[in-house]
Amino acid sequence: MFLRSGLIGLTFTVAAQAAAAGDSFPLTIQNCGQSVTFDAPAASSVTVGQAATEVLYALGLGDKVLGTSVWFNDVLPEYADVNAKVERLADNDPSFESVVAKRPGLVAAQYEWHVGPEGVVAKREQFHDLGIPTYVMPADCVGKDNTTGGDGTRTQMFTTESLYQGIEELAAIFGEAEKGAELVADYKAREAAAVAKAKEVALADASAVFWFSSPELESDPFVAGQKGAPGYMMQQLGLRNVIETDEEWPTVGWETIAKANPTVIVIARMDRRRFAADDYEKKLEFLRNDPVASQMDAVKNGRIVVMDAQAMDATIRAIPALEDLAAELSAIGNGA
């Protein structure tokens, strides 16, 4: 395989969609500000990010994954067998050397902050200089400026189209465009059903806050901004996000959140233990005992929903999570 890359604009183009629609080679894809050309299908991959890993598994390409990294939770049960055969390079950030040692035909990353202009694993050019192509999931860059805010800032509301774009493009890179089209069609059907279920939920003048984690339990939490995947869910459910910034995961003080008094609090459950508040049980304990947080109506009335952390991000898990959240809110609305 021969890689050619160059810096281009940040916006996803119609040309990229056309390229991803088929799997003829050479294949050129405009990906997160770079033009990447593949002269032949990728034969293997190392993934940096659980979202990219699970997309490849969903495409039936698990036998081409040489190593994985950056895990928030256990792999989806349907991929447990294939995942057991793949080496986990790191629970969190892998080293550049460990990725390169696999000599993958592709490095597929979930976040630009791992593999990108300021990547903590490496810049894309570092891999390209070694003849290793890179691909960043479009959900992390389409309508998003990763140069501002702690985890970037959404310039447009997240939509699932960027998820589908990632599925189609990864499939095309491996010469499996038809599998990508089939998987996208399946997810679109599931999304339509989930949105229809969400529309049935009617909570009058309801609001919410999504709490992902916190560096320390008592410190300002990382909560969902207006336009990320949680914003998409809230939009579908008619919930008002009490957090008004467009940053992906801003930190906001508990005094401010308590003053907004959200109807529902959604907290992330993850197996990762990077931060003190990664453990959802500790989140619950904090909410029930902190003198400020415990005064919110959502806490007093038990309107706290636990959600898979990966589902709070722009991943394929966001679609079934929308359905689950609709069911939880329906139960809350009915006084269950």
Image: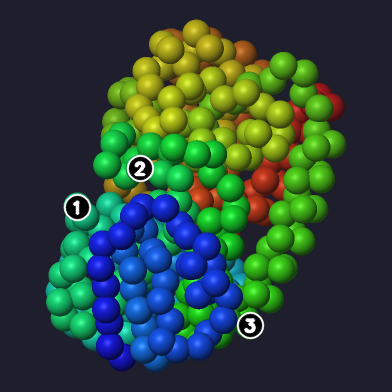
Which residue was labeled with disc 3? 178
**Neighbour tally class for label 3: few under 14, some 14-19, many 20 plus, Cα within 10 Å:** some
Residue at screen point 40% across, 76% down: 28
**Neighbour tally class for label 2: few under 14, some 14-19, many 20 plus, Cα within 10 Å:** some
Quadrant that contains the C terminus = top right
Specify whether 230 is left or right of 329: left
Residue at screen point 48% across, 67% down: 16
Q: Nearer the viewer, residue 257 or 5?
A: 5
Q: Nearer the viewer, residue 243 or 305?
A: 243
Image quadrant in which you'd find residue 87: bottom left
Secondary structure beneath label 3: helix
Q: Say which amino acid is labelled 1.
A: Glu
Residue 36, relative to residue 217: is it above or below? below
Where's residue 149, x and y in %?
31, 34
CB atoms at circles 3 and 1 under 8 Å apart?
A: no
Which residue was labeled with disc 1? 118
Secondary structure beneath label 2: strand
Where's residue 186, x and y in %?
72, 68
Secondary structure beneath label 1: loop
Residue at screen point 84% across, 36% down: 200
Q: Nearer the viewer, residue 291 or 127?
A: 127
Q: Say which amino acid is labelled 3.
A: Glu
Specify whether 279 is left or right of 300: left
Q: Earlier in the sequence, mark 1 or mark 2?
A: 1
